[in-house]
Image: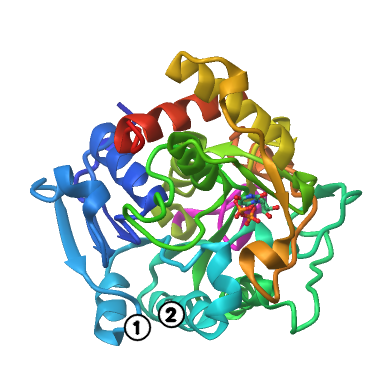
Amino acid sequence: MNPLFNDSSITVAIVGCGGFIGCHLLDAILTRTQWRVFGVDLDFYRIQHRLSNERCEFMVADLADKSVVERIAKYPVVVNLAAICTPSRYMAEASEVIRSNYDHPASLAEACAKSGSWLIHFSTSEVYGRTSADSGLLVEDETELTFGPVSASRWSYATAKLLTERYIAGLKNLKWTVVRPFNFVGPYMDFMPGVDGSGIPRVLANFSSALVRGEPLKLVNGGTAKRSFTSVFDAIEFLFALFETGKMGRVSAALGAATEVSKLPFSQAFNVGNPDNEITIAELAHKMRKIFAEIKGVSLESIPEPEKISGVEYYGKGYDDSMRRLPSVEKAERLLGFKAQTPIDVVLRESLTWFVMHYGFPNH
Ligand code: UDP
């Protein structure tokens, strides 16, 4: 085993430990390393089986509590995954979305700057904003970031996330890395409306819910927007590449040569995505219907046809969209040697199979 992974003196603080990405990160740390985890969240249902693990300490809290923020920042590596990140809430609860995605992470960043912790902050690919259908590769340090008018409250989330990135980058003495996820999908993503959550989850969970209920998939504005879907397991590989390259934040003090400094993952924002998995939402609907028919052992014709719906009708006033989100992944490959590997069909089959096993078929 890599000696870094064997080092039982390392504790990683994971904020949002019970969430979709957090639960997979926790599993990976506990199975692949000897590290300890300090996990903070409001909800632990995804990680019930880990609650009594002797290498873990968990706390029910959020970043609104300053004393919790101070406590988290005592650990040398802090991964912040906590956020309101459900698009349907960006319109209805814009102020709350901004507090969650700017005020809280900003105070965590200040505390980490004081304590000297390495903050790995999860931002979003949505910081690239209102991209058009002919947008090309989105490059971390080059692409213009463009948002719609204030009346298009869809951009409340992206604007807050971007402000947090700028704040983090401007804080003196903060050792930071920003991660911009491109539509991570996999087991435990979001929720099933009416079962363990309410409102509209992101597209994969929403399509999965409709399929198991025998309802038509809804194609917002015709389903012409494109996304590059990325396996959450690839995202965890990215984090491990980051941990290794940053040697859990310890290497910087010992560094000499400037050439080595340029290879470090600090003071960098990284796209984490899979450009090979780019598809339109209409294509996603087709693939998911096909895979679902196979899992259920029925014909494709027996699965309802998708229906088109306008974005405002579906999500409410203020909805707007990014038409294409294609990540440049050159930087992560160059600095960390990381490249996402899992093809779209594998990601979708794995996610949908998990969904069906987890929630069953409510109509049966
Ligand atoms: N979408 C859709 N039907 C749904 C849910 C989402 O057509 O039931 C579309 C949505 O309008 C967007 C894309 O799918 O174009 C991805 O939406 P998601 O909510 O997953 O998150 P986003 O990538 O926009 O942050």
Q: Give residue 331's quadrant in the image.
A: top right
Q: Residues within 10 Å of mark 1 (few under 14, many from 20)?
A: some
Q: Which residue is mark 2?
A: 104
State the image coordinates of residue 93 (x, y, percent, origin top left). 52, 80
Q: Does mark 1 have its CB less than 8 Å from ligand 1?
A: no
Of residue 188 and residue 299, the one placed in the foreground of this image is 299
The residue pinned by badge 1 equals: 64
Residue 273, label in figure: none
Residue in the image at 40% along x and 37% along y: 187
Q: Quadrant of the N terminus?
A: top left
Q: Amino acid at mark 1?
A: Ala
Q: Earlier in the sequence, mark 2 or mark 1?
A: 1
**2 and 1 marks in contact (CB < 8 Å):** yes
Query: Three-letter amino acid code at disc 2?
Result: His
Magenta stretch, residue numbers: 254-270
At 43% from the left and 51% from the top, the residue drawn is: 190
Q: How many residues crowd around disc 2 within 10 Å: few (fewer than 14), some, or many (20 or more)?
A: many
Residue 2, position as x, y percentages in the image: 34, 30
Residue 181 appears in the picture as rendered: yes
Q: Answer yes or no: is residue 329 visible.
A: no
